[in-house]
Amino acid sequence: MSWRFNPAPGWPSSPQEFSPPPEWRPDPAWPPAPENWPFWIWVDDPSSSPSGTERAAAPSSEMPLTTSVTVSSPGAVRLPSGTGQLHGDDGTLTLAEDSLELRLSVGRFGDALKGALRVRRYPIMTVADVRYEPPSSWHRGSLRLLLVPGADPLRPLLKDPEPGPGSDPDSLVISSSQAAQADSFAQLLRARLTEPRPTAAAGSPCVESGVLPLEVSGSDGRVSFDGQTVALKFGRLATPEKKRAGQNFPVDALADVQVHHPGLTGWLRFVPAGTPEAAPSDPKTDVNTLVLKADRSQSYAVLGAAVVSAIRRTGTRPYAEPISPAPSLLPATTEHSQHPAPGADPTTEQPSRTSGVPARTEPNPGLRATRSGYRQHHHTRRTLVERATCCPASRQGLRKGPGRMGT
């Protein structure tokens, strides 16, 4: 088995041993090659390699990726030296000079998360290793990119940070017919990763997810992101506080994104720079929070990861301004108050405050009785009963009801 040059449809056939030199270019009169056309294919050639141990020992499985092929059509794909492309069952992984791109193409019944992602872009400095599991007779294989810790903002936002190969955002599913190409691609990528390269530092690019613009609908509104601004718009089911607010956040005004996955309830919160990153006290009234509804594709996590990637590019600090403690809402306590609280008796000793929390005091019974008409009437009846108990002469007036007693 060996790699053979595969001419595009409409191109003249080439000899089996033909290998284009680096300066080779197709004739402009030839029809353009289709997009993502595989210029190299893996074929079985018994005449060129005998069999058995000689075939296993022969270094013929190395993909000849040192040849550059330039196609003169609009949108042409140029594969420079040391680059390659691998087609899997659910996408295509392309190795460029300083990055990798995973384009996911799942069908109607494919994985929902990969369908929402569509594209993942990896700077070469964010990839630590590659793991290839060949397919067997009873399951398909996979090729997974292992990333530098902290380089991927998407995985911490997922409901399951370690899904299976079919749902993993960094994995390509490999069938038996693609096993040889996947093994060669893994060898090529490992060779690239062992070369000297810049190390990932603070503020360096991270993995990017999704295709902009992104939009997610929730229970009380929707949020969109165009790469520069996060727009929160609330609908008719939102609380009055949210309807009056409506938020537009430039990327440099944000510090982080928080996700609580929807079960019975969930939310997506955008943390402005200079504010604590605590969870919202009430997502239904927090103007920086979108209440989520059930979403199998986790498109809200994809949008959140895109926002975090943009935040890292701008270098926004989580706390742009020092946070000062909130002023106390309790009045300063003094040993003798010049202005006693309404309804309190200034001659009686007031409860002391030892822990900074005001002690509970019993309200004035007269004020309590006037809170509602019912309580006022109940208080009047109780007074009449007390008078009837003390004065037997007034029992006859009590039987007539309040307001009918004789004077």
Image: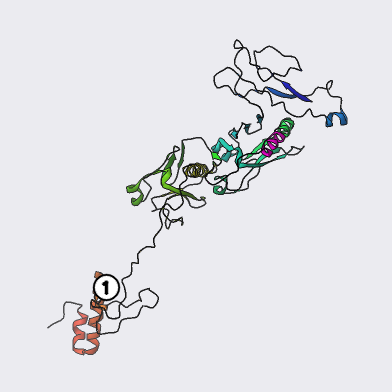
Q: Residue at x 70, y 23 (%)?
A: 40
Against 323, is 124 above or below?
Answer: above
Residue 28 versus residue 372: which sits nearer the camera?
Answer: 28
Query: Quick one: 258 or 215, which is closer to the camera?
Result: 258
Residue occupying image coordinates x 54% and y 39%: 208
Label 1 crowd bin: few (<14), some (14–19), many (20+), radius 10 Å: few
Identify the magenta region: 185-203
Q: Is residue 265 magenta?
A: no
SS type, badge 1: helix
Quadrant in the picture for the N terminus: top right
Residue 178: horizontal and vertical position, in percent? 71, 31
Q: Position of residue 256 (x, y in %)?
A: 47, 49
Please state the horizontal and vertical placement of residue 160, each as a whole percent of the image. 59, 49
Position of 345 with respect to 78 (left or right) is left
Query: Where, quadrant-wise, is the C terminus in this rendering?
Result: bottom left
Quarter residue 167 falls in? top right
Q: What residue sits 54% from the left and 19% below the top?
A: 74
Q: Which residue is mark 1?
A: 375
Picture quarter containing residue 124? top right
Depicted 324 relative to depicted 87: above or below: below
Please tell me whether residue 192 belongs to the stretch shown in magenta.
Answer: yes
Q: Say what amino acid the circle numbered 1 marks.
A: Arg
Q: Nearer the viewer, residue 398 or 172?
A: 172
Residue 351: x %, y % from top left: 33, 81
